[in-house]
Amino acid sequence: MFIGHYAVGFLLKKKFNTIPLWVFFIAVQFVDILAFISVLLGVDKMSYNPTSNPFLRTSMDYLPLTHSLSNSLGIALIVFLVFWKLKDKTWGIVLSMGVLSHWFIDFIAHTPDMPLIFNSYKVGLGLWNYP
């Protein structure tokens, strides 16, 4: 599934070649980086689920802090404001697009475990059920 996130990084690099590729890679994975930190801190919860499908072995029990659409929008907004201030508006817009793309790629791949608002109604198209 990570290839989908990195593909967005490559696409953004093609269009905005003044920004280093590694910055795009961090942007498209920033939500997962925050998720792993929040799980380690005990804020969010993930568990191991033994199954024959290798993509479904990690269960997103409670990840509204990073993987809800509403909070992904908030994270993207923060990234936009930080990079607009530190670099310029283009960096802010492009990197926030990379951050927000994470939720939409996950929505396509995940089973219905992607919350819309905090931990509310969960959605997902489940593409990874069809390898």
Image: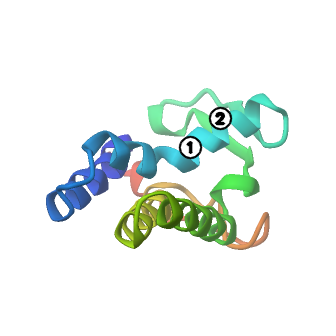
Q: Position of residue 48 (x, y in %)?
A: 67, 28
Q: Is residue 91 above or below residue 40?
A: below
* Nearer the observer, 34 or 60: 34
* Nearer the observer, 51 or 74: 74
Q: Residue at x 55, y 65 (%)?
A: 76
In screen coordinates, is 10 left or right of 100? left
Give SS at disc 2: helix
Tag shown at residue 36: 2
Q: Position of residue 46 (x, y in %)?
A: 72, 37
* Nearer the observer, 109 or 12: 12
The quadrant holding residue 13 is: bottom left
Image quarter (top left, top right, bottom left or bottom right) of the N terminus: top left
- Name of the residue lying farthest toward the right: 42
Q: Position of residue 6 (x, y in %)?
A: 31, 46
Q: Residue at x 40, y 66 (%)?
A: 88
Q: Residue at x 72, y 32 (%)?
A: 47
In screen coordinates, is 9 left or right of 106? left
Does residue 49 appear anywhere in the picture? yes
- Disc 1 vs disc 2: Cβ atoms closer than 8 Å? yes
Q: Which residue is mark 1?
A: 32
In screen coordinates, is 83 left or right of 121? left
In screen coordinates, is 30 left or right of 113? left
* Nearer the observer, 77 or 123: 77
Q: Residue at x 42, y 67 (%)?
A: 97
Label 1, label 2: how far apart the Cα atoms are:
6 Å
Q: Amino acid at mark 1?
A: Asp
